[in-house]
Image (cartoon, helix red, strand yellow):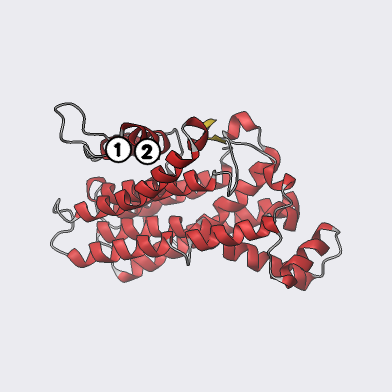
C-alpha cells in the first residue's frame, strides 16, 4: 500500500488547493472563504491510513487499469470519508475532540465551520468524479462514469452511510427496537439466549455494513469501473469488500478496548463509557478477534478469480486484521 500513498497525497493536495493571488488552478475557487478552505484541507490532508482511496487504486489495477485512471475516484471517496468524520465528531453526534492524533475540525475551528466544511466536501467529491470524464480516462465509455457517480451517491446516502450512522446513534440514545434493546440488556447481564445473541449480531452487522462497509464497497466498485472491470470482476470485488469492511469495524471495536490513545490517534474506551453495542461486548474479545479473522479469510477467498493481480488487495486485508491504529 505504501507505493500508492505518494500519488494519493499529491492528488488530495491538488484537489483541495485554493485559488490565491495570481493562481487560478486551485480546485477551491476564488469564492471559497479562506477559513473554510483551511478547514477542508485540515480534514482531508490529516495524516491517515488512506485505506479507501488505496482500495480504489488497487481495484483498478486488479482489473487491468492504471492508477492515473482511478485517481479521481480515489480522491472522491476520501472526500466523502473526510466529510463523514467531520460530522461524526460533532457534539450532536459522537462528540469527539481528537481525530488522527490532533484536534477534530470543530475544535480546531468551530462547529459552524466544521459543518460547512463537511457540506462542501460532498459536492467536491462528485465534482472530482465528473471531471474524470473530461480527462479521457474512461476510454470512450461515459456509462461507467454515470455508474460510478450513482454508486457513490447510494453509498453516502440515507440507505447506507447516513442511515447506518442514524442507527448507530440510536444505539447510544436508547432508541433501539424493543427486541434489540431487551436482548442487549440480557447480553450485558450475561443472560441472553443464543437466539438473542444472533439477533443482536445481525442488527449490529446491518449498522456497520452500511456505516463503514458501504464506503469500502463503493471504493472497490469505483476502482473497478474506472479500471475497466467486467460484471463478474465487479461482483468479486464487492464480495471482498463486504467481508473486509465489516472486519475493519470489528477490529475498530477491539482497538477501542485494547489500544492506547496515543497509538490510535483518538479517544479510546468511549464505546464502553456509552454502553454502546460492540462486537467485543457481544462476542467477547477472543470471539471478536476470531470473527474478524474469519471475515478477512473469506474476503481473500472472494478474490480467487483475479489470481496474482489481487495480491495487493490480499495484503490490504491482512493489514486490516493486524492494524494497531
Vertical placement of residue 47 versus 239, above or below: above
Residue 102 relative to residue 143: left or right? right
Where disc 2 sits, the SS reads helix
Callout 1: few (<14), some (14-19), or many (20+) C-alpha neighbours within 10 Å? many
Task: Measuring from the top left, give residue 290's x and y in whole percent.
Answer: 67, 54
Tell me the element at label 1.
loop
Q: Is residue 94 left or right of residue 218?
A: right
Between residues 216 and 101, which one lies in front from this camera angle? 101
| Sequence order check, earlier mark of 1 and 2 | 1
State yes or no: discs 1 and 2 in contact (Cβ < 8 Å): yes
The structure residue drawn at horizontal position 76% and vertical position 70%, both measured from the top left corner, is: 196
Q: Is residue 24 above or below residue 162?
A: above
Of 74 and 44, nearer the camera is: 44
Residue 163: x and y, percent? 52, 63
Please, is residue 186 above or below residue 76 in the view?
below
Dividing the picture into quarters, in which one does residue 12 lie? top left
For marks 1 and 2, give the CA distance. 7 Å
Q: Quadrant of the N terminus?
A: top left
**Crowd around label 2: few <14 · some 14–19 · many ≥20 (10 Å):** many
Q: Label 1, on which residue?
A: 16
Quadrant containing the C terminus is: top right
Residue at point 41%, 33% (across, down): 42
Q: Residue furthest top?
A: 21
Percent across and percent down for residue 309 are: 34, 53
The residue located at (32%, 70%) in the rendering is: 231
Q: Is residue 190 left or right of residue 134?
A: right
Q: Position of residue 17 (x, y in %)?
A: 26, 34
Q: Which mark is residue 40?
A: 2
Q: Is residue 130 left or right of residue 35?
A: left
Amino acid at each position: 500500500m505504501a507505493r500508492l500513498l505518494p500519488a494519493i497525497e499529491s492528488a488530495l493536495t491538488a484537489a483541495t488547493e485554493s485559488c490565491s493571488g495570481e493562481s487560478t488552478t486551485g480546485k477551491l475557487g476564488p469564492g471559497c472563504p479562506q477559513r473554510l478552505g483551511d478547514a477542508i484541507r485540515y480534514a482531508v490532508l490529516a495524516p491517515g491510513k488512506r485505506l479507501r482511496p488505496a482500495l480504489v487504486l488497487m481495484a483498478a489495477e486488479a482489473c487491468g487499469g492504471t492508477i492515473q485512471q482511478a485517481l479521481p475516484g480515489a480522491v472522491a471517496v476520501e472526500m466523502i470519508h473526510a466529510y463523514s468524520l467531520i460530522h461524526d465528531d460533532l457534539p450532536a453526534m459522537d462528540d469527539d475532540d481528537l481525530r488522527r492524533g490532533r484536534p477534530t475540525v470543530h475544535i480546531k475551528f468551530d462547529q459552524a465551520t466544521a459543518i460547512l466544511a463537511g457540506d462542501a466536501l460532498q459536492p467536491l467529491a462528485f465534482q472530482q468524479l465528473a471531471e474524470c470524464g473530461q480527462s479521457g480516462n474512461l476510454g470512450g465509455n461515459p456509462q461507467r462514469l454515470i455508474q460510478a457517480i450513482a454508486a457513490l451517491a447510494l453509498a453516502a446516502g440515507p440507505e447506507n452511510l447516513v442511515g447506518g450512522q442514524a442507527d448507530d446513534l440510536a444505539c447510544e440514545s436508547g432508541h433501539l427496537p424493543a427486541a434489540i434493546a431487551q436482548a442487549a440488556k440480557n447480553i450485558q447481564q450475561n443472560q441472553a439466549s443464543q437466539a438473542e445473541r444472533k439477533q443482536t449480531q445481525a442488527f449490529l452487522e446491518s449498522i456497520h455494513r452500511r456505516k463503514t462497509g458501504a464506503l469500502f464497497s463503493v471504493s472497490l466498485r469505483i476502482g473497478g469501473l474506472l479500471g475497466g472491470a467486467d460484471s463478474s470482476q465487479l461482483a468479486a470485488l464487492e464480495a471482498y469488500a463486504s467481508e473486509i469492511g465489516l472486519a475493519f469495524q470489528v477490529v475498530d471495536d477491539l482497538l477501542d478496548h485494547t489500544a492506547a490513545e496515543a497509538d490510535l490517534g483518538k479517544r479510546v474506551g468511549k464505546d464502553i463509557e456509552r454502553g454502546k453495542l460492540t462486537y467485543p461486548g457481544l462476542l467477547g474479545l477472543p470471539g471478536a478477534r476470531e470473527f474478524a479473522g474469519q471475515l478477512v479469510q473469506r474476503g481473500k477467498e472472494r478474490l480467487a478469480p483475479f489470481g496474482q493481480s489481487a495480491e495487493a488487495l490480499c495484503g490490504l486485508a491482512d493489514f486490516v486484521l493486524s492494524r494497531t491504529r
